[in-house]
Image (tube, rainbow, N blue to C red):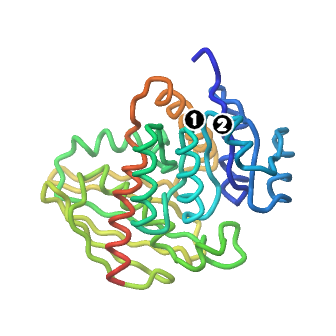
Amino acid sequence: MSERLRIGLVGAGPWGQLFTGPMLANSPDATFVGVWARRPEAAAALATAHGVPAYDDLDQLFGDCQAVTFSVPPSVQAELAMKAARAGLAVLLDKPVGSNVAEAEALAAAIDAAGVMSQVIFTNRYFDATRAFLAQAQQFDSYGGRAAFFGNGCIPGTFFGTPWRIAEGGLLDLGPHVLDGLDAALGRIVGITARGDAHRLVLLECEHENGRLSQAQLCATSNQDSGLVVEVHGPDGGLKLDIGAFTPEQGAAEFATAQRRIVAEFANSIATGTAHELDVHRGLAMQRLIDDAASQL
């Protein structure tokens, strides 16, 4: 690309500090325009860390950008991303894209009506290891599979223990990763059953459009050093992606790869007018599965 994508950050939460801010600051494909947040002191701290302006006026940030990304609670993202789309900006969304199906549907409709590009940061999907696994899994003769994700993001006092995660529990936080992984590896999920407690352990059973079956378990109130695990199984054995088993060096390398790849693919999507595989409609599809599962708990 001859020109870098001018992109701003809306929000200064934990994900913005850990991932999104550094991602924009270090991208060869983007110019990090600045930060706006509901808490001006948080915006100032994050902006200072990366040598960019902190904005007091969200509309002013929008006016200086071609695109924006988000580090805010899901319901806030849905509201502000609709506003950004209506202002003509491409939107790089966090998962989940909203806190429920109604918000996700409204956001997708606003993005479609505005004719702007969207992309969702399903972080694991941008790892080299994940893409290699999915390329194999999609060609593998399997009966089905299973997935798991254990973490502590819904425990008060932890780095990701923000109010929305503590209130909603692990299904809304980790469910997008688990369901996206199973869906991508085994085919579209057409039915889901769920039991458990979103603040303890959730067990899922999924039926895929090709007759394959899968199971999953997830928990965001468990102090474990874990990550997404996805397996497929068939007559010739199985394949496994275990992100929690990455060495520290591999984890750091995959993290950096994801940060570069997310922005590069987003910029390319905007430049070519080609919808990304992980656009807002992918986020909406996962939200529908999550809401279906949540209604059964």
In the rendered structure, are the residues bearing label 1 and label 2 in contact, judged by CB atoms less than 8 Å apart? yes
**Which residue is identified by label 1?**
263
Q: Mark on residue 7?
A: 2
Pointer 1 local density, CA inside 10 Å: few below 14, some 14–19, many at least 20 = many
Give whichever of 67, 241 is nearer the camera.
67
Q: Is 121 left, or right, of 295 in this rendering?
A: right
Given the image, on which type of amino acid does mark 1 rest?
Answer: Val
Q: Give the secondary structure at mark 1.
A: helix
Question: For the residues carrying marks 1 and 2, which lies nearer the camera in this image?
Answer: 2
| Residue 191 in the image, given as x and y percentages of width and height | 21, 67
Q: Give the secondary structure at mark 2.
A: strand
Give whichever of 228, 46 is nearer the camera.
46
Quadrant in the picture for the C terminus: bottom left
Q: Earlier in the sequence, mark 1 or mark 2?
A: 2
Pointer 2 local density, CA inside 10 Å: few below 14, some 14–19, many at least 20 = many
In this view, the residue farthest toward the top is: 2
| Residue 50 in the image, given as x and y percentages of width and height | 81, 41
